[in-house]
Amino acid sequence: MPHDPPSEFRLSCPVPLDLHTTVQMAHGGGGRAMRGLIEGLFLPAFAPPGGPRGPAHDSAIIPVGGARLAFTTDTFVVSPLFFPGGDIGKLAVFGTVNDLAMAGARPQWLSAGFVLEEGFALETLGRIVASMRAAADEAGVQIVTGDTKVVDRGKGDGVFLNTAGLGVVPAGIEVTPARVAPGDVILVSGDLGRHGIAILSVREGLAFDGALPSDCAPLGALVEALVALGAGLHCLRDLTRGGLAAALNEIAADAQVGMELDESAIPVAPPVAGACELLGLDPLYVANEGRLVAFVPGRLADRALAIMRAHPAAPDAATIGRVTAEHPGLVEVRNPLGGGRIVDLPAGEPMPRIC
């Protein structure tokens, strides 16, 4: 989650008094409860006294000599381990690579920690490890260190993965929610909701007409292309837990700006829209693992969109809205008839263990 390590914990909602209840609600992340848990427990415990606190982001930025390193960590507990378009190993590598990329960094090195349940099949573990190697090769990173622990049978649900990553931020690049400003244009790199629906299709044994695989993909090369915008690249965020809704609300709160979205411009594939309607889900809240949202000044909107659409990771990129000075901290979606609705942070995680 960029200015310094404590920035990963700078969030705005106070933690509820009943911490046990909060943990139960927030275990999947991406909502008010998790932000409250971070703000109320982790940030006070880990932030250096009196230290600066930048806005929350996907990676911390650490100056080392004359360079700046992006540093991130994540833990993966997805269920099932294998799903259409990916698996826990591929997800762990790409998820960590993407967090580094959202700080404008060039991902370089990863670690991998395995928590294995006693009795877990070595053949299955071999498939996961091979998938991680293939994903690392695709993303252009190296897995350089790791760890393995075994827990008692029945206490680990097969395998959990923890990854950490390091990347190098190019000189002159400052990608952070603090730079989002009125007049910025909001772009997404592709259609929304594929990953969450792919997970549900396997987990719940559902068959959706024309169902699509997860969008699980590395975004480092796409971000490297966008870095050509230089200082005009204000902010990036990958749309994982809580989907587009969570990402925009977090950035709006940190930057103290409003956001207006054009509902008709938000890309959602018909199979995903149909599945969401059947399940009573809003695609704006459904998780993605290969999509990002970008903020650039209005004068660079066309150039940014052209860069995205020219890249294999974002051929269906779209401009979906703008940043305003009105209603700081709020995200509003306008429909073609001129009506609007407020899109808030999810109160909890409607789909736990999706990553």
Image (cartoon, helix red, strand yellow):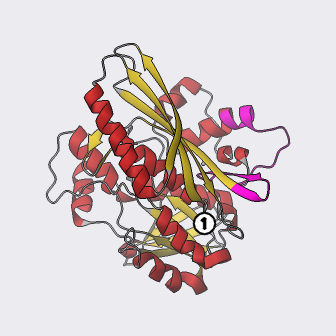
Q: Position of residue 25 (x, y in %)?
A: 47, 33
Amino acid type at mark 1:
Cys
Query: Is residue 184 among the parts visible in the rendering?
Result: no
Q: How many labels does the image show?
A: 1
The residue shown at (65%, 61%) is 169
Pick whichever, 218 or 195, lies toward us.
Answer: 218
**Magenta residues?**
42-68
Instruction: Specify whether residue 54 is painted magenta.
Output: yes
The residue shown at (59%, 43%) is 35
Pick whichever, 215 or 351, lies toward us.
Answer: 215
Q: In which quarter of the image is the C terminus?
A: top left
Instruction: Specify whether residue 143 is painted magenta.
Output: no
Pick whichever, 212 or 165, lies toward us.
Answer: 165
249 vs 271, left or right, is: right
Q: Say above or below: 225 vs 80.
A: below
Q: Where is residue 221 in the image (x, y as percent from the top left)?
A: 48, 66
Pick whichever, 252 or 241, lies toward us.
Answer: 241
Q: In which quarter of the image is residue 236?
A: bottom right
275 vs 319, left or right, is: left
| Residue density around tag 1, few if under 14, some if 14–19, many if 20 or more, within 10 Å | many
Name the residue beneath numbered marker 1.
235
Q: Position of residue 148 (x, y in %)?
A: 47, 25
Secondary structure beneath dot 1 equals strand
